[in-house]
Image (cartoon, rainbow, N blue to C red):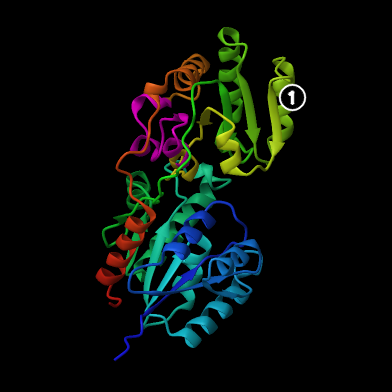
Amino acid sequence: MVLIAPTALWVVPVSDLAGVARHVLDVARAGIPGWRLVFLTPPGDLPRELKAVGAAVLEQPFGPEHGLRASMASLRHTVRSLRPQVVHSHLSYADIVTALAVGRGARLVTTEHGIARDDVIYHRSMAKARVMAAVHTVRMRRFDAAIAVSLATADAMVEKWHPRREVVVIPNGVDAVATTHPGAGLRILSLARLAPEKRLPSLVSGFAELRRAHPEARLTLAGAGPEAGALRDQVDRLGLGEVVTMPGFVDPDQAMAAHDVLAMLSVWENCSYALLDAAGRGMGVVASDVGANPEILPAASLVRAEDPHAVASALAAQGLDLTARPGLTGWPTVADMCARVAETYAVAGGRP
């Protein structure tokens, strides 16, 4: 007798390869034990990459760019066709559409990747933040299980949305990489959107302090975003034009291999893959003491972003003292993460 694995429908409202796409692709490659996975996404780069790793993908008009009516229609049609035992949504838009569109039968699971303790980080006004908190408080009542990618994320969910069920913490899993960083140096790398919440002006100020003691230091601000012009102006004003580069988007693996320290001074991070990858490669890491960063990094890697002297000191230590670098001993692998998701499905009432 051949047993047919139950279906879990992953609902992802974005089609690019930023942010949550890494999580989705890792799970698609590894699989969730005992489950058949199907991914619902809008057309674009993410479904192309999912198909390349052999995943079952449905490209539908779904997500903010397609509007609420079309998104609900796409999800309803998909659920009627597949009859999944679990509908697992990612990101707030998909969470809300899932709560509205999916009727009785399938168990609903959500993973929270992007909540912050400070509402203004993701919302332009406190009024909008309060409205969205109320919406999420209501929609959480429809879900049979809620996953957070860190303890800090779970705490913020409880504080803002008051879920009736315990939030399950399943950190982003990462696998060990064969390539480790070869040695000491002060080639500093930022892999972040050029946006206010990343506090890149603080990094540039800290780097300027570092250069006073270490003129050999170099800084790469990789990425794009609305702060690009202001950052170029700051770099020029500080006389750093010859030692700071802004290449736009880069391949993260290649960039990490060519640098010594990853710096991330964000206002908030939930469970940063960039920090995990850098620590796993043996790079130095300097990050703000916020969100889940203390769950990933030791105190030697954490700084107050507003203090340029502290930033400069940490960059120097992480670049030049190999014994100060964090490493990633004991962190969950991708397989560990997927096994925990399977356990959560079972507790939520799905099979097996």
Count the marks: how many?
Answer: 1
Residue 117 sits in which quadrant? top left
Based on the picture, tell me whether residue 182 belongs to the magenta stretch: no
Residue at position x 47%, y 50% in the image: 114
Position in image of residue 225 (x %, y %): 68, 41
Classify the position of the N terminus by image quarter.
bottom left
Left or right of residue 322: residue 144: left
Q: Which sits in the foreground, 258 or 93?
A: 258
The correct choice, above or below, for 88 with respect to 289 in the image is below
Residue at position x 57%, y 78% in the image: 74
Classify the position of the C terminus by image quarter.
bottom left
Residue closest to the far bottom: 1
Label 1, residues with CA under 10 Å away: few <14, some 14-19, many ≥20: few
Left or right of residue 236: residue 92: left
Q: Which residues are magenta?
A: 277-302
Residue 99 sits in which quadrant? bottom left
Give the labeled residue for mark 1. Answer: 233
The correct choice, above or below, for 219 with respect to 266 in the image is above
Position in image of residue 97 (x %, y %): 51, 70
Left or right of residue 220: residue 77: left
Residue at position x 50%, y 41% in the image: 274
The answer to whether residue 91 is visible is no
Position in image of residue 101 (x %, y %): 49, 77
